[in-house]
Image: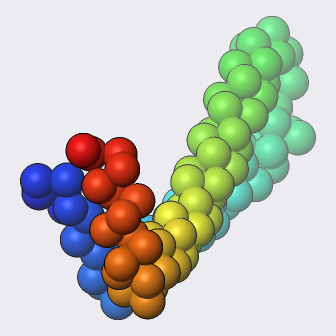
Amino acid sequence: MTTSGTVHLDPTAHAAAATLLDDRLRELDARRRTAEASVERLLSTWHGEAATAFGSQWATWSSAASSVVADLGGDVAALAGARGDLVAADTGASQHPRAMAGHLEGRLG
């Protein structure tokens, strides 16, 4: 949460939320792979115009779903990086408060 230009971060809660999101994403990907395997089995025995049309649309959907899962995975991974950056910035600011105050005075007037 940001209030008056201050960022508040509970690293433990943030890590727990990121872990939960990662777990949910893994569940989503497992369900996507299960559906993909089921449809692939169906398509291996289904022939004709309808099968061809469905197979084409299925390939589009499957590719898009895989991309969404990959993109979400990148977002979840970025959460850990953001947490690390904020903790490092906070640690640096607390270890060098005079330097930080001087830096801020120079920027804020």
Q: From the top left corner, tell me how far across and down residue 25 is, in percent.
A: 53, 64
Residue 3 vertical position relative to residue 67 in the rendered view, above or below: below
The picture quadrant where one finds residue 13 is: bottom left
State left or right for residue 56 relative to residue 106. right
Is the C terminus in the top left, top right, bottom left or bottom right quadrant? top left
Which colouring convention does the figure follow? Answer: rainbow
Q: From the top left corner, tell me how far across and down residue 95 is, in percent.
A: 43, 89
Residue 52 vertical position relative to residue 82 in the rendered view, above or below: above
Taking the image as drawn, is residue 60 in sight? yes
Residue 3 vertical position relative to residue 47 in the rendered view, above or below: below
State left or right for residue 15 relative to residue 49. left
Q: Residue at x 66, y 32 (%)?
A: 64
The picture quadrant where one finds residue 1 is: bottom left
Q: 49 or 10, which is in the foreground? A: 10
Taking the image as drawn, is residue 19 in sight? no
Of all residues shown, which one is farthest toward the left? 4
Q: Residue at x 58, y 68 (%)?
A: 81
Q: Residue at x 68, y 50 (%)?
A: 70
Q: Residue at x 88, y 40 (%)?
A: 44
